[in-house]
Image (cartoon, rainbow, N blue to C red):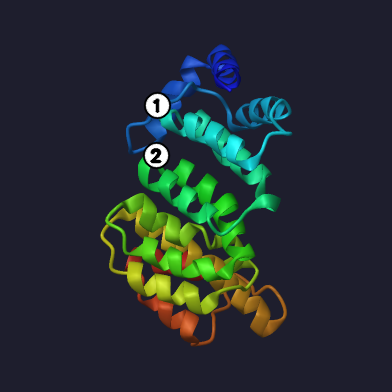
Amino acid sequence: MNKIIEDIRLELIRNGDEKIKLSGERFFKEDIKLYGIRSASVIKIGKDHYKTIKGKSKSEIFSLCEELWKSGILEESFIACNWSYYVHKSYEPSDFDIFGRWVNSYVSNWASCDTLCNHSVGTLVEMYPSLLSGLKGWAGSSNRWVKRAAAVSLIVPARKGKFLDDIFEIADILHSDSEDMVRKGYGWMLKAASQAHQEEVFGYVMSKKATMPRTSLRYAIEKMPSELKEKAIAK
């Protein structure tokens, strides 16, 4: 198992680019560690190495993911996120606790948070809606990345028009949060929900100048900080 991780790290090191690394470090407000590899190349490296472990159990793959998370390096976190999603057909409700531990223990930037939550966590919650109560618990966390995760995990379901009442509840919990990354996360969630709701009500995609009717969703958006309102209701 360690050989797999070693092989991935050697390839990531070989593909690292100092210019991309420095550019990436300037892009994030947080201090991050990275090799300096473009996202498309990271995805390809992860897919290539996944072929060697495809037959392993979900628990074995999750263990490898955790080793990648522990490094604290951005590109390794992306591979961990993708690998955890590749086994989504085998997800069980108990996996929510594993994902929650990863967010709480290892996530330290918005890119890792969103990559894990948009896909793995969001898919798990769609499969098992009873886990929505767990997301609401995340929204009350003291960890800003866990709070952001509560919102961004519902981006894809929101686009499908799902879980609107639960989205409102999470928005109610997060709307007064002072953390910029949290506010942007729940603003993104509400924007996705607002677009889905417009299509559901009107049966077509509204123009940029169109406005939403005053619904409970509109009310939720109105609670947002002023600098996010315009982005949330814009099409």
In the depicted structure, whether residue 63 falls above or below residue 85: above
Q: Earlier in the sequence, mark 2 or mark 1?
A: 1
Secondary structure of the residue carrying tag 2 is: helix
Specify few, some or many for label 2: CA neighbours under 10 Å numbering under 14, 14-19, or 20 or more. Answer: many
Is residue 108 in view? no
List the residue tagged with mark 1: 33
Q: Amino acid at mark 1?
A: Lys
Q: Amino acid at mark 2?
A: Tyr
Label ID, residue 50? none
Q: Residue at x 56, y 39 (%)?
A: 62
Specify few, some or many for label 1: CA neighbours under 10 Å numbering under 14, 14-19, or 20 or more. Answer: some
- Nearer the observer, disc 2 or disc 1? 2
In the depicted structure, whether residue 16 falls above or below residue 160: above
Q: Quadrant of residue 80?
A: top right
Is residue 202 in view? yes
Q: Residue at x 60, y 42 (%)?
A: 84
Q: Residue at x 55, y 24 (%)?
A: 37
Q: Quadrant of the N terminus?
A: top right
Percent from the top left, x then y, of residue 23? 44, 26
Label ID, residue 106? 2
Work out which residue is located at the far bottom of the displayed protein and give it: 214
Q: Quadrant of residue 162?
A: bottom right
Q: Quadrant of the C terminus?
A: bottom right
Percent from the top left, x then y, of residue 98? 48, 48
- The CA distance from mark 2 to mark 1 is 12 Å
Secondary structure of the residue carrying tag 1 is: loop
Q: Nearer the viewer, residue 97 or 110?
A: 97
